[in-house]
Amino acid sequence: MSTPLIVSEFVTVDGVVEAPGGEPTHPHAGWALDFAGEEQMQYKLREVQEAGSLLLGRVTYDGFAAAWPDREGEFADKMNAMPKHVVTSSRTTPLEWNNSTVITGDIATGIRALKEQDGAPILVAGSATLVPFLLEQGLVDELRLMVFPVAVGGGKRCFPDNQSKQTFSLADSVAFPSGVAVHTYRPA
């Protein structure tokens, strides 16, 4: 039995995943904040509680490592306690956020090794550079797109830009009063 790898992304209706929380990389940074709701927060809390570890790209890791250690509460406690695996080519030194390790070298092989372990799901959040690679390599078991009712006209997307075709089956769909909907897909 392998550990499932779940990608969970905030995405605009025009497919952008970049800067949902206010990161300075996009002119419309913080687009997700306009649609915050208690039901969505509870959904994300359950998602994190069910995860056994995080898999993050370096940029997302750096942002999370700067934010989560100083926060308190159930969500922060889980984020800070769980193992974090970081894909990076620019850092090999020990990472400062507790329970963090670096995956280097053959990234696909390293991630497959993580998936071969029995355990709770591996959760990928953000990581706009890593996610297209995971999709290209066929490493994603479930894709959760939390779609926000806003278009920002361009930015990083979570799918590879290689014109390959990938098909998915809809496993679940949940809508929130804010207009945000989560569509959960599995590779077909």
Image: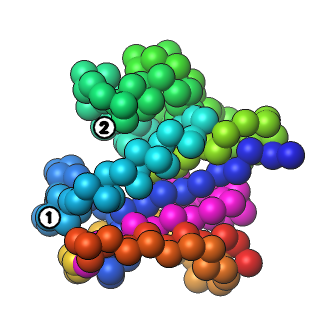
State the residue at coordinates (21%, 59%).
Answer: 36
Whether label 2 touches label 1, CB < 8 Å: no
Q: Distance between the residues labelled 2 and 1?
A: 20 Å
Question: Residue placed at 23% from the left, 59% from the top?
Answer: 37
Q: Is residue 83 visible?
A: yes
The structure residue drawn at horizontal position 66% and vertical position 70%, both measured from the top left corner, is 186
- The picture places residue 147, in percent across and down from the top left corner, at 36, 73
Mark count: 2
Give the answer, above or below, for where 87 lies relative to 21: above
Q: In this view, does 108 lie to the left or right of 21?
A: right
Name the residue at 81% across, 46% down.
Answer: 2
Q: Does the magenta stretch include residue 146?
A: yes
Q: In this view, does 188 lie above or below 49?
A: below
Q: Observer-nearest residue: 8 or 40?
A: 40
Q: Name the residue carrying label 1.
A: 34
Secondary element at tag 1? helix
In what element is the residue under mark 2? Answer: helix
Amino acid carrying mark 2 in the image: Gly
| 97 and 71: which is toward the camera | 71
Residue that mark 2 sits on: 63
Circle 1: residue type = Asp
Q: In which quarter of the image is the C terminus?
A: bottom right
What colour scheme does the image use?
A: rainbow
N-terminal label among 2 and 1: 1
Q: Return the x and y of residue 80 as percentages of the image width and height.
A: 42, 25
In the image, 151 versus 59, the foreground residue is 151
Q: Position of residue 118 (x, y in %)?
A: 79, 36
What's the magenta region? 128-149
Q: Residues within 10 Å of mark 2 (few under 14, many from 20)?
A: few
Residue 26 showing in the rendered view? no
Is 186 within the magenta?
Answer: no
> Which quadrant holds residue 103?
top right
